[in-house]
Every structure is written in structure tokens, then in C-alpha cells.
Image (cartoon, rainbow, N blue to C red):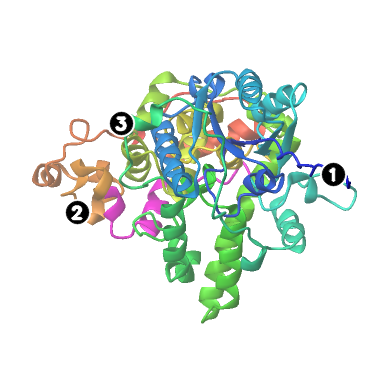
């Protein structure tokens, strides 16, 4: 009689945790793809980390945007057979508990480059099987360097090497999965069911990010080279919040820029797409700087400018924060930030220059204020931008480059539409006085319904005088004249 061999069964691979941080998307998600390739069920997990959420740098609008994005991601997961697991606590403890509960044996996450993220991930990896996967940038900071292996600190050569490393094409991108198996007995917090404030200007989620990208490359990108400097126009992509939270893959954005360059119908259109690609590379350059020089979070990159004797006048800082400096383009920008959580990049530079150069307030105060209010607040980009304007950072603008708020406003808001939108008290002011409303004669102030000093503030500093003071300040690293000299008008 023949002996029948028992058929051996192959055990199903254990579950993997997809630890979501700044990759709220299914499309071209390398961490998700790695978890799926490991076989077995996948648990989509987002951890509310008190170290981040309870930080004074956590902007309420940014938290709302993130929560709305998590809800959108959960909505995308459910048709695939999965749902978002939301938990709160110290990451290592949450992950350890979930692994014990679910029997999962692997954790996949997109690598982040901030000093806190690197400390957090090192702590997790010390006791748990964490696998970090690329995806926050097109090229990892370690992949773009000089011939001698040292990191770049100047943008132009960095961008050349970045481009030489390869720009993704559509065919290089990972498609969103059509199914995700998830253990049915793993649950999380029910916060996603509660009320969430939606930002009407920036609806959160991957679908909105892809819609905006398609709309932008379908036309506006052609004139981006010039229109990007006009805060009165809708000439930018409006994608920065989505890139900040990974609702859009940076590889997909770069691929779209490359495709637009290749299919451009004119030299101007090609230049527009190339300019936008360079803006994406600037984002990665600042990520690289933060990765290689984490000290920039707290101090100036340039050693020679680390001991500047900033004035740090609380009254000046408050006037700047509330949009009450007396310079319309600066005030319009700051009020746009307070009302919407976003600001045009040109006016970010102008307002930052005014704070650091005209008022000699430490750039760290401005950086902190932006992070507390910006919907797209990103540690690397925000820090890099502030230090660039202040002249203290890597690849910095020269200290003697000081933006004139009046001439900049005339050049980039030529009809005054941006100023009038955010400063309604100046709505009836004639264009000839709009950029310098303090020059209005008394009868014009009366007819415009805008009395300087009552309805709109007089300038808190004379720009011409402040420019000379700033040049002395940076050159000698000391303040020679602290009076504001506004009475000289």
C-alpha cells in the first residue's frame, strides 16, 4: 500500500506596517510599494506624535490640512480593501505595540531629513525592524555631491549635478496599487470621523494635488518664468502644501516639468517649464543643506555672521507680524499669511528682507512666525529661504542686496490689485499714492477715506535710511544708528 505524503502548506508572509509620515498618497509611493512587495498584509499607519503636534511650531492651519489629507487618504484606501490606522503616542512605543498586536515583522517608511526625524528614526531602528525608503526628494542628499564627496553649498553646481543624476519620466513612476490586504482586527483612533476645518483655497488630498498639477502643466507653466514673480496673478502651481505632505510625488512633479519642457511650443514656454523645474530643485537643495548641516536650524550657516547684534525690537516685530509696517506690499503679504496660511514667494522674500534688513530683527523670529502660520511650512525650505534673504545662509544673497518695498511693489503689482485685495483700507487710494500712501496730501487722504496714522499706519522706518544702516550693520557687525529716522520725511 502506497504511503501518501502530506501536502506541505507554505505559511503566509507576516504583515508589514506602512508608517505614513510625509507621503499621503498611493501614487508613486516607494515606501508603500516596498511594503507590498514584502508580501502579506499591509497596515497603513499614521502616528500622531506629540513631539510634533504639540510643538509651538505646529501651525493650526497646517494641522487641519494634514488631518483633511489623512481623511482623503483613508477614503482612497477603503475601495482597495484597507483603511487608515490612526494612533497617538511616542512612535517607538506605538510601533512596538502594533507589531505585538498584529504579528507584523517589518516597518517601511519614507526617509525624512529633519534633525528631529533623523533622531526619531534612529531611536526606532535601534529596537525595531525599520526600513527607510526614498521618496521625500527625487535624489537623496547623499546622491548629489561634489567630485570629492563633499556636499554642495552653492545652488547652480548642485542643480547641474542633480540634473545629471537623472530626471524621472512618467514610465519611471510607480502606479497606485489596485488592492491592499490589511488585517481586519487592527483598529485605530476615530479622529478622522470628527469635524475638520477645510481650507477652501487648498483642499487637501492626493486627487486635488494631481488635478492642480494637470491644470498647471496644461497652460500656466508656459508663462511661469515671468508670472511667478507677480503676486497679483495666479501664476504659480499652488502645489507647495501638497509637496510638503507628499500628497504629490516629487518624482511626478519633476517628470511633469521635464515633459512640459520637451513638448513646449515656444522658447518662452520651455523656459517656463525649466524655471519651475529649478524651483523643485531649490526645494531639494535646501533639503540637502539641512541634511548635511543640521546646525542651520538654530544658527547662521555663515560663521562670520553668527554673532550679528540684531536689534530685535518687540514693537517692530509685532508691527511686521500684523501687517502694520506702513509699507503696503509688506503689509499685504503679512495679512495674506494671517488670513490664508499662504504667501506668494516674491512677497515672502520682500517681507523677510524688510524684517531682517530694514528692521534688523533676527531672521529666526521671522522663520518661527512663518512656521507657525504657513500651510506649506517646511523646515528645510523655510530655513533656507530665510537665511538666503538675511544673507546668513549657504548660497546666500549678498548682504548688500536689500529689497526696496516700494520699487518692488510697483514692478510686481503694477495695478495695485494685490495690495488692494489684502489692504481694504487702501482700496480707494489713487494708484499714484498707493505704493507710498504717506505721501498723500490731506485732501486726497480725506477723499480716499484713508487717513495715515489712523486708518493705515505711517511707515515705522525710513527705507533709505534703514538701507544705509543695514549696510553698516552687516559690514561691521554692529549697529551704529539705532534711531529710526522716520521724522526725516
Rendered image: mark on residue 195: 3
The percent coordinates of residue 96 (x first, y second) are: 66, 21
Separation of marks 2 and 3 at Cα, in angstroms? 44 Å
The percent coordinates of residue 342 (x first, y second) are: 40, 42
One can see residue 397 in this view: no
Mark nearer the viewer, 1 or 3? 1
- In the image, the segment drawn in magenta is 398-419
Which residue is the site of mark 2?
A: 430
Q: Quadrant of the C terminus?
A: top left
Residue 95, placed above or below residue 33: above
Tag 3's secondary structure?
A: loop
**Residue 165 vs residue 482: left or right?**
right
Residue 10 occupies which quadrant of the picture? top right
Q: Residue furthest bottom?
A: 265
Q: Is residue 412 magenta?
A: yes
Instruction: Give neighbour class at mark 3: few <14, some 14-19, many 20+ (Cα, 10 Å).
Output: few
Separation of marks 1 and 3 at Cα, in angstroms? 59 Å
Q: Is residue 78 magenta?
A: no
Tag 1's secondary structure?
A: loop
Mark nearer the viewer, 2 or 3? 3
Which residue is the site of mark 1?
A: 5
Amino acid at each position: 500500500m502506497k504511503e501518501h505524503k502530506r501536502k506541505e502548506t507554505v505559511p503566509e508572509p507576516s504583515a508589514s506596517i506602512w508608517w505614513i509620515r510625509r507621503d499621503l498618497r498611493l501614487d508613486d509611493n516607494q515606501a508603500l510599494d516596498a511594503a507590498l512587495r514584502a508580501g502579506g498584509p499591509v497596515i497603513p499607519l499614521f502616528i500622531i506624535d506629540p513631539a510634533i503636534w504639540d510643538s509651538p511650531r505646529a501651525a493650526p492651519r497646517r494641522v487641519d490640512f494634514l488631518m483633511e489629507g489623512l481623511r482623503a487618504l483613508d477614503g482612497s484606501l477603503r475601495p482597495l480593501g484597507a483603511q487608515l490606522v490612526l494612533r497617538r503616542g511616542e512612535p517607538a512605543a506605538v510601533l512596538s505595540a502594533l507589531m505585538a498586536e498584529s504579528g507584523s515583522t517589518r516597518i517601511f517608511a519614507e526617509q525624512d531629513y529633519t534633525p528631529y526625524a533623523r533622531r526619531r528614526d534612529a531611536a526606532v531602528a535601534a529596537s525595531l525592524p525599520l526600513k527607510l525608503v526614498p521618496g521625500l526628494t527625487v535624489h537623496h542628499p547623499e546622491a548629489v555631491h561634489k567630485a570629492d564627496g563633499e556636499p554642495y553649498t552653492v545652488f547652480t553646481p548642485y542643480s547641474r549635478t542633480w540634473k545629471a543624476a537623472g530626471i524621472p519620466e512618467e514610465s519611471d513612476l510607480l502606479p497606485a496599487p489596485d488592492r491592499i490586504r490589511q488585517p481586519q482586527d487592527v483598529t485605530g483612533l476615530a479622529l478622522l470621523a470628527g469635524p475638520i476645518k477645510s481650507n477652501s483655497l487648498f483642499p487637501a488630498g492626493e486627487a486635488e494635488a494631481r488635478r492642480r498639477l494637470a491644470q498647471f502643466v496644461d497652460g500656466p507653466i508656459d508663462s511661469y518664468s515671468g508670472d511667478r514673480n507677480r503676486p497679483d496673478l495666479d501664476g504659480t502651481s499652488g502645489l507647495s502644501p501638497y509637496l510638503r505632505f507628499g500628497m504629490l510625488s516629487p518624482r511626478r512633479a519633476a517628470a511633469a516639468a521635464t515633459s512640459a519642457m520637451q513638448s513646449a511650443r515656444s522658447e518662452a514656454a520651455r523656459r517656463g517649464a525649466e524655471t519651475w523645474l529649478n524651483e523643485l530643485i531649490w526645494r531639494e537643495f535646501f533639503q540637502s543643506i539641512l541634511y548635511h548641516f543640521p546646525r542651520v536650524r538654530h544658527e547662521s550657516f555663515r560663521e562670520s555672521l553668527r554673532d550679528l547684534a540684531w536689534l530685535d525690537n518687540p514693537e517692530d516685530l509685532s508691527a511686521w507680524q500684523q501687517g502694520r509696517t506702513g509699507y503696503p506690499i509688506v503689509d499685504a503679504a503679512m495679512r495674506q499669511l494671517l488670513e490664508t496660511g499662504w504667501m506668494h514667494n516674491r512677497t515672502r522674500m520682500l517681507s523677510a528682507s524688510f524684517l531682517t534688513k530694514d528692521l534688523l530683527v533676527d531672521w529666526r523670529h521671522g522663520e518661527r512666525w512663518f512656521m507657525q502660520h504657513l500651510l506649506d511650512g517646511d523646515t528645510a525650505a523655510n530655513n533656507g529661504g530665510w537665511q538666503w534673504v538675511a544673507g546668513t545662509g549657504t548660497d546666500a544673497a549678498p548682504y548688500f542686496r536689500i529689497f526696496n518695498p516700494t520699487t518692488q511693489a510697483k514692478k510686481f503689482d503694477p495695478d495695485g490689485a494685490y495690495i488692494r485685495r489684502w489692504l481694504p483700507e487702501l482700496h480707494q487710494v489713487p494708484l499714484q499714492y498707493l505704493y507710498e500712501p504717506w505721501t498723500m496730501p490731506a485732501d486726497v487722504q480725506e477723499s480716499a477715506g484713508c487717513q495715515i496714522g489712523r486708518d493705515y499706519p505711517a511707515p515705522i522706518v525710513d527705507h533709505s535710511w534703514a538701507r544705509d544702516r543695514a549696510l553698516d550693520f552687516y559690514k561691521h557687525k554692529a549697529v551704529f544708528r539705532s534711531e529710526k529716522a522716520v521724522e526725516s520725511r
